[in-house]
Image: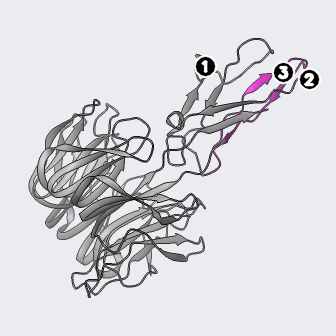
């Protein structure tokens, strides 16, 4: 019997997308179609190799591949061999958008923490940033950063793949941008950018696929938009745009599939909406809309699946909510809602976690960290323990003392450990986002 062991090293660009949050991927190292998943070796001829990721079910530390068959000379039978992907866990860095100071990148130290020595200023100068979003705009496998600024040009920071970025101004002019979102609004597979402006028309930047964008005006007129989200709310395969406004009805822009949209007012009335998020909060497979309001009750718009929504009030009472995100914090299969609050009195308000009961209702609880003035909140498993952690971006308190940003480590038992993030205390964070670290080389082996 001949024992054959072979290692294949894949570059970070090759495997970008085989992360726990990536889609299904096929890495094909031979010219044969991926339907052929057998590899035969006779000690002389060239070997055909296939890596086939099952569906989109990649999970942290447990990426599974189909088992290939391989005939080994000296034996008259076929043996099954399991290929294993040897990859470090996905690391998440934190992007902080600031007002009046350089935006920053907090680099994950590899064990789920963030150190002062690993805080890096991002290019682009001292902007008045109100919104940050992350997406792979140029389709090179690395997440780029889109920066929404108030009173100046918005920016695109192209990820060079080595934790450095190249900044350029986006078209559209100097706007009062308060919300940025991304989506593939057409069928060209390029990521487009949606720009929400205050007291100005909102814009769609169509990605031309060559590093340029075509600016289109979105319907709805000049709105006082404070938040933008995207999701396929009508299940037609095209991402729609949800617009959160101040003092006006919120809107959904239904994607017609041809780079045009039909604007519809959402139910709930004219609100002071500061944040919009989407999630499937129940088991009907329709995307629901979560509305975060300032000095008003927050709302859940349950998607009825027929173009209408049922308005429900979320627990917690009248809050000064400025940021909302949805994630399955307790790992029960239902998206929970995380509320970041920022009262105008600067007296502070506790942030909240609304645990999804799985039946369209929620149980509210207070997040640790004290009474804060939170401007932005997001969530990700930064320490790769299988539990979603919460990142909190704070501004200042009643004494005009800048509050440090926080990381709430999920202990997996319904409690959180509060850690202070580096870099704070001297800027005014307008937005927090998570960016995937470009993965290093990955080794695959079988024997």
Which x, y percent locates residue 400? 25, 83
Q: Give the quadrant of the C terminus.
A: top right
Residue topped by disc 3: 72
**Mark 3 burial class by Cα count in 10 Å: few <14, some 14-19, many 20+:** some
Q: Which residues are magenta?
A: 61-85
**Mark 1 burial class by Cα count in 10 Å: few <14, some 14-19, many 20+:** few
Under circle 1, the secondary element is loop
Residue beneath the point at 39% across and 46% down: 164
Alpha carbons under labels 1 and 2: distance apart: 26 Å
In which quadrant of the rendered view does residue 94 lie?
Answer: bottom left
In terms of depth relative to the viewer, which is nearer, 430 or 70? 430
Which x, y percent locates residue 63? 63, 44
Under circle 2, the secondary element is loop
The answer, for residue 283, to whether it is visible in the render is: no
Which x, y percent locates residue 352? 40, 77
Residue beneath the point at 74% across and 11% down: 45
In terms of depth relative to the viewer, which is nearer, 224 or 236? 224
Mark positioned earlier in the residue sequence (2 or 3): 2
Which x, y percent locates residue 329? 51, 66
Color scheme of the displayed model: one colour
Alpha carbons under labels 2 and 3: distance apart: 7 Å
Disc sitting over residue 1 in the figure? 2
Alpha carbons under labels 1 and 3: distance apart: 19 Å
In this rendering, the answer to whether 45 lies above or below 423 is: above
Mark positioned earlier in the residue sequence (1 or 2): 2
Q: What secondary structure is the magenta-colored segment mainly?
A: loop
Residue beneath the point at 25% across and 72% down: 293
Residue 296 painted magenta:
no
Residue 74 painted magenta:
yes
Q: What number of labels is visible?
A: 3
Residue topped by disc 1: 30
In which quadrant of the rendered view does residue 411 lie?
Answer: bottom right
């Amino acid at each position: 019997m001949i024992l054959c062991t072979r290692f294949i090293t894949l570059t970070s660009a090759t495997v970008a997308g085989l992360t726990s949050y990536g889609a299904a991927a096929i890495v094909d190292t031979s010219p044969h179609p991926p339907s052929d998943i057998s590899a035969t070796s006779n000690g002389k001829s060239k070997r055909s190799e296939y890596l086939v990721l099952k569906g989109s079910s990649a999970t942290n530390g447990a990426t599974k591949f189909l088992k290939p068959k391989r005939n080994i000379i000296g034996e008259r039978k076929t043996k099954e061999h399991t290929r294993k992907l040897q990859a470090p866990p996905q690391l998440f860095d934190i992007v902080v958008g600031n007002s009046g100071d350089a935006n920053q990148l907090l680099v994950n130290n590899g064990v789920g923490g963030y150190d002062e020595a690993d805080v890096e200023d991002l290019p682009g100068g001292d902007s008045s940033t109100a919104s940050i979003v992350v997406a792979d705009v140029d389709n090179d496998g690395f997440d780029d950063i889109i920066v929404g600024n108030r009173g100046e040009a918005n920016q695109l920071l192209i990820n060079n793949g080595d934790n450095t970025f190249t900044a350029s101004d986006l078209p559209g002019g100097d706007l009062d941008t308060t919300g940025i979102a991304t989506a593939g609004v057409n069928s060209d597979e390029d990521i487009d950018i949606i720009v929400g402006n205050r007291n100005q028309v909102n814009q769609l930047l169509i990605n031309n696929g060559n590093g340029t964008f075509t600016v289109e005006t979105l319907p709805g007129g000049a709105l006082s938009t404070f938040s933008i989200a995207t999701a396929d709310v009508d299940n037609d395969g095209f991402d729609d745009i949800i617009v959160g406004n101040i003092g006006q009805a919120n809107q959904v822009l239904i994607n017609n599939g041809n780079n045009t949209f039909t604007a519809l007012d959402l139910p709930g009335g004219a609100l002071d909406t500061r944040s919009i998020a989407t999630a499937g909060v129940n088991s009907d497979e329709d995307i629901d809309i979560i509305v975060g309001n300032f000095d008003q009750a927050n709302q859940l718009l349950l998607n009825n699946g027929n173009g209408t929504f049922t308005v429900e009030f979320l627990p917690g009472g009248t809050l000064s909510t400025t940021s909302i995100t949805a994630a399955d914090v307790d790992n029960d299969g239902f998206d929970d809602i995380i509320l970041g609050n920022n009262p105008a009195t600067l007296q502070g308000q506790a942030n909240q976690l609304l645990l999804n009961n799985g039946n369209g209702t929620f149980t509210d609880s207070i997040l640790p960290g004290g009474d804060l003035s939170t401007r932005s909140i997001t969530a990700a498993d930064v320490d790769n323990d299988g539990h979603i952690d919460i990142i909190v971006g704070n501004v200042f308190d009643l004494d005009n003392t800048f509050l440090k940003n926080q990381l709430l480590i999920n202990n997996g038992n319904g409690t959180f450990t509060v850690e202070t993030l580096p870099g704070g205390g001297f800027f005014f964070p307008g937005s927090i986002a998570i960016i995937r670290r470009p993965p290093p080389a990955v080794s695959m082996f079988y024997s």
